[in-house]
Image: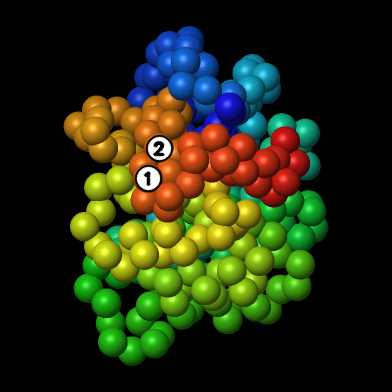
Amino acid sequence: MQLVDTHCHIHDKEYKFDIPKIFENAANQDVSTMICIGTSALDSQNAVEFAHKHPNCYATVGLHPHDAKLGEDDFEILASLANDPKVVAIGEFGLDYFYENSPKADQIKALRYQLELALSANKPCVFHVREAQKQDKSATGRAFADFWPIFDEFTGIRGVIHSFSSNVEDLEEALKRGLYIGLNGIITFTKDEKQLAAAKAVPLDRLLLETDSPFLTPTPKRGTINEPSNVRLVAEFLSRLRGESITTLADTTTGNAHTLFGI
């Protein structure tokens, strides 16, 4: 059995990971491959550099919605990195209305730019779409409601909605567009029945596993720094929730990762 952590940040120098120990722990939990996700120009450069040093790691390059206000200089650097052989996707990017660290206009500009970059580089996308903490009742107040019309301006986009924590309705919109769904530790501790229902409803051939480490540590390791080995805990929880064998879930999600990212 092999597992892939399709979304982690172990290249982030701020967290001073014990990298040999990270890889040892991952191997002990059958985690064979990790994708290090870029969130800014500098962070994307670090992810690519890290991936070149470690054969079982790949990288993405992207401008996170939190950093979308950084703008043009970062766009040029991302474009220069996009065709590196270790880069398997563009992202993470999208819309984040929870914190709105960048103005919505800047987030939308960065979203469109990176969709164009993904098409020109022939790479899939890693999408970050997060709703406001208190939902606006108007349709335009929702991140997904703003995201889909922009997505639909482009033809041929492939990718994954990372850290999916919405409902079945938003899941159906993603599946209609052929996207994969990334689930992580959130699903092991959420009390939101709509989130759990959506996790159960994801078709197995559209499911990807991730940790988002060092964030979102799954139960029962809450309170510790997350790492790729914990993708095994996500897989075990989903196996129970969905009534699927761990072997079937691991084999299929690993195949899905290979298919989407070409690894």
- Regarding residue 70, the answer to whether it shows in the image is no
Residue that carries the numbered disc 2 in the rendered image: 236
| Residue 82 higher or lower than 56, as above or below | below
- Please name whichever residue, 187 or 150, is drawn nearer the observer in this view of the structure: 187
- The x, y position of residue 84, in whole percent, is 76, 36
When asked about the image quadrant of residue 104, the answer is bottom left
When asked about the image quadrant of residue 212, the answer is top left
Seen in the image, is 47 located left or right of residue 237?
right
Kind of residue indicated by mark 1: Arg
Kind of residue indicated by mark 2: Glu
- The x, y position of residue 255, in whole percent, is 67, 41
- Regarding residue 244, the answer to whether it shows in the image is yes
Mark 1 vs mark 2, foreground winner is: 1
| Residue 144 higher or lower than 31, as above or below | below
Q: Outermost residue, bottom direction?
A: 138
Q: Quadrant of the C terminus?
A: top right
Identify the residue at horizontal 54%, vertical 75% (top origin).
173
* Disc 1 + disc 2, Cβ < 8 Å: yes
Residue that carries the numbered disc 1 in the rendered image: 240
| Residue 41 higher or lower than 139, as above or below | above
- The x, y position of residue 186, in whole percent, is 32, 49
Element at badge 2? helix
Residue 132, label in figure? none
